[in-house]
């Protein structure tokens, strides 16, 4: 566009399309309310003129920025990708823009990013899990910025959440694999400090052990960061100090795939020599060899529902409503029933 020309306006679009400015706004913000013919005429005019909506003016009029912040623990693997994609798609459908930041599982980094997003005018925030300083929730309440928790559900928590019960999900899963006869159990988990998802999954395994007559404190547990290499190293460490272990329960599919690599490096066959399980059911679980037996988390549904709930909290100025989602067990090839040979009996 030449320097002496002004940018096309909403009035220009309305004039070219032969509609009112209100109709143009409706086409941009709620297109489903227009007939197909009207919508196509407006979009054609927008395209021909090269019109870009003035979101600053829209924000001033609505007293909102139409942006939502999401703070996730990591971008280094696919644990949060599918849920966040569904969250973003649903926000886009509702006219909101998503800003994402990552904390590398550092509490101080999360607190800084929460304050930065609020300072930049985020209308609401999505966070992962309930574990954080209560002062942060007090701060968000003072700033009148709604916050919603995902990837975790705990009816005892005051902050609303769209997620699942990590402890119950892992308990049911562990009970199922322990029913196959395993008694020498190891676990590789993410660091549980300031991570309620990891802590609850560990507790779920111990619950299942108790149900099956095992002493929960005998769980051979290693906590490491969520990486393939750490999963492999943890598996090797665990098997060297307790070579009679018959099953290793992992707190995520990423750690489990690392554990399978560790088994391969040790010359162990999965599941013939040792069984390995994951948690999350990301795409990775289906491309490893053998494919992972794991817990399926409804990432897509969770992301969609979280976006709808957070927008409702913002626009209706109401408290959030927590919703518990179900997980399911996906049986593949990484788990085998125990045999007398494995137990030494």
Image (cartoon, grey):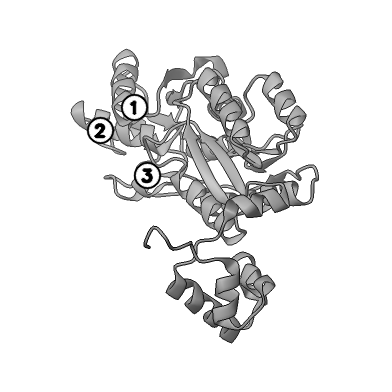
State the SS at label 1.
Answer: helix
Asked whether the residues under the numbered discs 1 and 2 touch, taking CB atoms below 8 Å apart as contact, a structural biologist would say yes
In which quarter of the view is residue 118 placed? top right
Q: Residue at x 72, y 52 (%)?
A: 62
Residue at image mark 2: 261
- Is residue 202 visible from the viewing direction of this image? no
Q: Residue 193: percent from the left, percent from the top?
A: 54, 17
The x, y position of residue 231, in whole percent, is: 34, 27
Q: Earlier in the sequence, mark 1 or mark 2?
A: 1
Identified at 71% across, 24% down, the residue is 139
Q: Give me the residue at 74% from left, 51% from top.
A: 315
Residue 165 position by quadrant = top right
Quadrant occupied by the C terminus? top left
Please rate how many residues cluster around mark 1, counting C-alpha atoms within 10 Å: few if below 14, some from 14 to 19, many from 20. many
Is residue 342 among the parts visible in the rendering? yes
Distance, label 3 to label 1, CA atoms, is 14 Å
x, y percent for residue 81:
44, 45
CB under 8 Å between callouts 3 and 1?
A: no
Disc 3 designates what residue? 292
110 left or right of 289 in image: right
**Which residue ends up furthest to the bottom in the rendered image?**
37
Q: CA distance from mark 1 to mark 2?
A: 8 Å
For the view shown, which residue lies furthest in the front direction? Answer: 4
Disc sitting over residue 231 in the figure:
1
Which one is nearer the viewer's eye here, 339 or 262?
262
Quadrant in which the N terminus is drawn: bottom left
Q: Looking at the picture, how far across and down is residue 2, in whole percent?
A: 37, 62
The mark that comes first in sequence, 3 or 1, is 1
Rendered view: 86 above or below 131: below
**Image point (37%, 36%), residue name:** 254
Please tell me how many numbered marks the rendered image carries.
3
């Amino acid at each position: 566009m030449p320097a002496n020309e002004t940018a096309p306006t909403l009035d220009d679009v309305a004039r070219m399309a032969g509609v009112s400015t209100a109709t143009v706004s409706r086409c941009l913000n709620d297109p489903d309310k227009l007939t197909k013919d009207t919508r196509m005429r407006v979009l054609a005019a927008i395209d021909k003129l090269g019109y870009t909506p003035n979101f600053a003016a829209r924000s001033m009029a609505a007293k909102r920025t139409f942006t939502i912040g999401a703070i996730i623990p990591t971008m280094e693997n696919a644990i949060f990708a599918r849920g966040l994609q569904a969250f973003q798609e649903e926000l886009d459908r509702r006219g909101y823009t998503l800003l994402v930041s990552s904390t590398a599982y550092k509490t101080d980094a999360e607190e800084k990013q929460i304050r930065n997003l609020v300072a930049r005018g985020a209308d609401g925030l999505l966070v992962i899990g309930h574990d954080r300083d209560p002062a942060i929730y007090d701060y968000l309440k003072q700033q009148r910025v709604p916050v919603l928790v995902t990837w975790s559900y705990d009816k005892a928590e005051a902050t609303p959440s769209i997620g699942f019960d990590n402890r119950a999900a892992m308990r049911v899963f562990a009970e199922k694999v322990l029913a196959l006869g395993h008694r020498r159990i190891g676990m590789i988990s993410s660091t549980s400090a300031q991570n309620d998802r990891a802590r609850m999954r560990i507790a779920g395994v111990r619950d299942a052990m108790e149900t099956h007559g095992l002493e929960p404190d005998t769980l051979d547990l290693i906590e490491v960061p969520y990486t393939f290499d750490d999963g492999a190293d943890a598996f090797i460490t665990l098997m060297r100090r307790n070579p009679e272990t018959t099953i290793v329960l992992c707190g995520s599919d990423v750690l489990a795939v690392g554990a399978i690599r560790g088994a391969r490096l040790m010359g162990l066959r999965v599941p013939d020599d040792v069984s390995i399980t994951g948690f999350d059911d990301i795409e990775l679980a289906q491309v490893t060899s053998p494919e992972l037996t794991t817990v399926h988390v409804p990432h897509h549904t969770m992301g969609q529902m979280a976006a709808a709930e957070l927008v409702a909290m913002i626009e209706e100025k109401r408290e959030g409503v927590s919703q518990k989602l179900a997980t399911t067990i996906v049986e593949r090839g990484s788990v085998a029933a125990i045999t007398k040979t494995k137990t030494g009996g």
